[in-house]
Image (spheres, coloured by chain):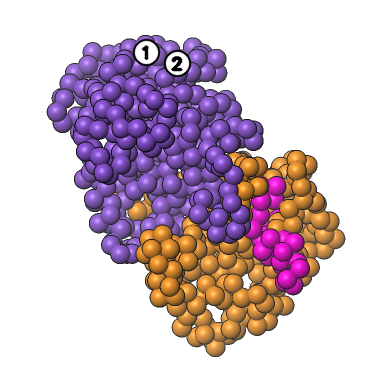
Amino acid sequence: MREEANSEQPRTTAKLARPAPGAAPGSARQPSPDALNETPSAPDRGNVGQDVQADIWVKCPGCKEIAFRKEVERNLNVCLKCGYHLRLTVEQRLAITVDRGSWRELFADLAVGNPLSFVDSRPYSERLETARRASGRNDAIVTGIAKIDRRVTALAVMDFNFMGGSMGIVVGEKLARLIDHARARRLPVVVFSSSGGARMQEGALSLMQMAKVSAALGRLRDARIPYLSVLCDPTTGGVAASFASLGDLNIAEPGAIIGFAGRRVIEQTTNQQLPDGFQTAEFLLRHGMLDAIVPRHRMRATLSQLLGILAPRRAHKSVD
Amino acid sequence: MKPSSEAKEVVQGLTPIERVRLAREPGRPQTLDYIEGLARDFFEIHGDRRYADDEAIVTGLGYLGRNAVAIAGHQRGRSTAERIRRNFGRAHPEGYRKAARLFDLADRFRLPIVTFIDTQGAEPGIGAEERGQGEAIATNLVLMARVTVPIIACVIGEGGSGGALALGVANRVLMQENASYSVITPEGCAAILWRDANPEKVAAAAAALKLSAQDLLDLKVIDEVVPEPPGGAHRNPAQAVALLGAAISRHLTKLSKMRPQQLRRERERKFAEMGNGFLLRSTARIGDSTA
């Protein structure tokens, strides 16, 4: 790594690390126990029950136990009682995944206006603006280069808090550019998905992003560069029906909801009661649709191991 | 062939939701009507060699004019019995995997691919999820992007979401003037964004989604609007088949002159550019699509 690496703040954290200006994502070899405390999570972006004081307490959606937020965060946002994996913010995900200070965000300036002049109860441009203000980023994904346990990797993390992680032109374009960039530099690609699917407000243009990203992955495949898809809660719709399902290896977090169609749509269409655990990662694994389920505590080590096997000789490259 | 001026009047006066109704008109010609009207010596290929033969998608080999081609299309069905058998054109994963087999076959034997898109969407159901609906669609997207033979996709009714796109990654996407193509049905969109699926909200969603052929041509999602007979394809199915057949032949002739890698590159470039005209900042692509 070059010298300026330490002086330059990674882009995402620079925008969001309000109370802790020194907070750089990443820990050393292992995710440090305090990893999540290094990057503050804004109260409005948590996943806690609304009835609980969001700043201090967190209610586990799995066992409904109420616990100290700090304590749960120290456990990588995994419930201490039942092991439920609560969602992570992008900053938290980066913090526990990449080597400290190694994240270099790319294509952060890409944005769209309102291509279809779409208006429902509110104009799309207003919804976008609200999401941008809350997140400090332009759209529902960050893309960049980072080191995962010293292995230089092209990395993307979707932001479910940004309009449900929906994929429009910007998400599609950032992914396509990242994949093409990775191909040019011969870097492995890791994508953490978390998305409700295509962004309706961009109409057929959002649908076409599925083809755009899939085509880029086809080129990557031809170049024999590995792509690891990590499916996080939730990964559905057009994202599940494109790049999230196209990993050389598809790995999910425990309990993640993964599926093509929404639960309600299926219930209405089939008039059938859905089986227990339908569309969970465990359900997919049982049906042969996932390669593995990896708990969050082991994700970084697992990615490192797999990148070592599929993309050796990539370590010690620069992220710049 | 051009539509008569009367037809243009009829068609131009339509609101988006009226156009969606026209796209759903049961009397419109379906994939098998186009195959019967346009193809010679058609041999249907059944099954995905994994699980089942999904009759919501028809695949096979035959001739269009002098060109040996591979054809795949959604078939909604006409009679109640046929509709149920074909699940109203809503394919399961095995339908997309059957199409994938055909695309692979076509690529290896250098047969141009012609697809007909006519589905509200891929089947939302327990079995579909168990057998990997998302993966099946995703795999087709990569496969269609990669093949080195010409692909022409024709939207002939309702083009719904990923289930439509799984047959739609083509060098030329042709769309009949009263067909629709959308990321979600107007009903689904209204239910989610307006939290209300009453007719007024559905009409508003249909307008907002820009799902008509002309809108999608303007957005560069499709490449050509194919005229229909006066009043719509269902009024004169034979003429509708002939009009689309003429457009397919014209594009097939042009595309057949292109080299294999050129066909792939052109197709990849087209999809790589989708929506980029609306990016607010830097629009330069890194890497481009050269393999």
Is residue A113 visible to us here?
A: yes
Q: In this view, does B146 lie above or below A270?
A: above
Q: Residue B188 location in percent, x, y? A: 47, 62
Tell me the kind of residue under disc 2.
Ala
Q: What residue range appears in magenta?
A: B69-95
Both marks 2 and 1 on one chain: yes
What residue would you read off at disc 1?
A30
Real-space Cα separation, disc 2 to disc 1, in angstroms:
8 Å
Quarter of the figure that contains the N terminus of chain A: top left
Left or right: A278, with A137 as reference point: right
Mark 2 chain: A
Residue sitting farthest toward the bottom = B6
What residue would you read off at disc 2?
A301
Q: Colour of chain B?
A: orange
Q: Residue B138 location in percent, x, y? A: 57, 43
Left or right: A298, with A93 as reference point: right
